[in-house]
Image (tube, helix red, strand yellow):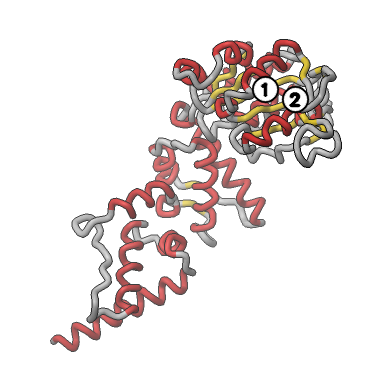
């Protein structure tokens, strides 16, 4: 899976072999992912069928939505994406449906909404479970009547686009909790595409990781690198709560930490949330602690203790430790070197 393209009002010319290329951004060979892509490919042939894509954060829901769009008959039309959680409630209705002059203070001229901007293309509603309850009946009416009104307007405007919604939670649970309308759920879930979490398809970790390594080499204009067998084993052992997005970040970090080496090794694999958890849970019995006394300890000594603790947390990986401390690797090396020299001087003085 590669980076999603920009997410507002993009126009794409259809590829002459669009059905074969529409889902090329989805990387993986597992039966679970293959089945999801096949579902998306089939629904793309149905021009206005509403689609609900369900999957955890980082599983590629927008890529699936774009694949449906690019595989369909209206691939040359706009693909417009909106995150329902990212737009303030006060602006969401006017952003979605547009408004007429005088609809609210400051509305001096009419403005088309996102639905209108999508034209005959695709409107992608991400995090649909975050749609405010006040707007849920309006979206329901849009889906049922295939028409809507601008805010402050009286004219019924036709809906010509396909609606693809996405959720990273089970909408059935949101319905049961009273947070999401049941009738809207059934309108959205005309055709559901469930995306598997990365931990459910461990065989795909290797191929996706290699893809991201190649991508990093191209982006940084560096020589291609390989992943050692030990590093690959470490990657497969991780649960990947952030899914493919997390894997991408880990590989990009590993590519940088490996420096001039042409092989990514286990010491280059730094799981950020694991380090955060270690830092939070650090204790004198586990990895030692840094204390700032009232007197008797210099700043250099405190820096040395911080450097040694961070080195222990990162498995003595200087690049990873320097990144955590927010300093350069040469600076970390100097602090460690000065700390060792200071310790030797103190021992010599005591002796």
Q: Judge by depth and name the residue closer to the eye, 108 or 261.
A: 108
Q: Residue furthest left?
A: 351
Q: Earlier in the sequence, mark 1 or mark 2?
A: 2
Instruction: Determine which residue is flagged by label 2.
Output: 122
Q: Which residue is rendered at x = 70% and y = 32% of the image?
A: 81
Where residue 42 appears, as percent x and y from the top left, is 68, 14
Where residue 101 appears, as percent x and y from the top left, is 84, 34
Q: Which residue is rendered at x = 66% and y = 51% of the image?
A: 218
Q: Which residue is rendered at x = 30% and y = 77% of the image?
A: 301
Where residue 326 appears, as percent x and y from the top left, is 47, 65
| Numbered disc 1: secondary structure | strand
Quadrant housing residue 1: top right
Residues tagged 1 and 2 counted as in contact (Cβ below 8 A) = yes
Instruction: Determine which residue is flagged by label 1.
Output: 164
| Numbered disc 2: secondary structure | strand
Q: Quadrant of the C terminus?
A: bottom left
Q: Judge by depth and name the residue closer to the eye, 174 or 6.
A: 174
């Amino acid at each position: 899976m590669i980076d999603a393209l920009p997410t507002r009002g993009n126009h794409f010319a259809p590829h002459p072999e669009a059905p074969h290329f529409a889902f090329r951004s989805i990387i993986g060979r597992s039966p679970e992912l293959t089945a999801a892509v096949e579902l998306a490919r089939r629904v793309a042939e149905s021009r206005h069928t509403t689609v609900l894509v369900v999957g955890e954060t980082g599983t590629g829901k927008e890529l699936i939505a774009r694949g449906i769009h690019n595989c369909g008959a209206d691939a040359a039309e706009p693909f417009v994406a909106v995150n329902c959680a990212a737009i303030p409630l006060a602006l969401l209705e006017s952003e979605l449906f547009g408004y007429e002059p005088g609809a609210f203070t400051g509305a001096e001229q009419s403005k088309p909404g996102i639905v209108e901007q999508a034209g005959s293309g695709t409107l992608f509603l991400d995090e649909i479970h975050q749609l405010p309850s006040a707007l849920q009946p309006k979206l329901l009416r849009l889906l049922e009547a295939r028409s809507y009104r601008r805010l402050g307007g009286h004219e019924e405007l036709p809906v010509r686009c396909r609606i693809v919604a996405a959720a990273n939670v089970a909408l059935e649970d949101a319905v049961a909790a009273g947070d999401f309308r049941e009738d809207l759920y059934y309108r959205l879930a005309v055709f559901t595409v469930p995306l598997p979490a990365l931990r459910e398809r461990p065989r795909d970790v290797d191929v996706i990781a290699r893809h991201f390594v190649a991508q990093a080499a191209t982006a940084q204009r560096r020589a291609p690198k390989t992943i050692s067998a030990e590093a690959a084993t470490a990657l497969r052992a991780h649960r990947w709560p952030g899914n493919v997005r997390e894997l991408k970040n880990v590989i990009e970090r590993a590519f940088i930490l490996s420096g001039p080496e042409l092989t990514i090794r286990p010491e280059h694999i730094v799981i950020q949330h694991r380090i955060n958890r270690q830092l939070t849970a650090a204790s004198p019995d586990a990895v030692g602690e840094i204390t700032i006394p009232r007197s008797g300890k210099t700043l250099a000594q405190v820096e040395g203790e911080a450097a040694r603790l961070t080195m222990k947390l990162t498995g003595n990986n200087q690049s990873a430790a320097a990144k955590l401390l927010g300093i350069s690797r040469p600076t970390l090396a100097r602090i460690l070197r000065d700390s060792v020299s200071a310790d030797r001087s103190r021992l010599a003085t005591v002796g």
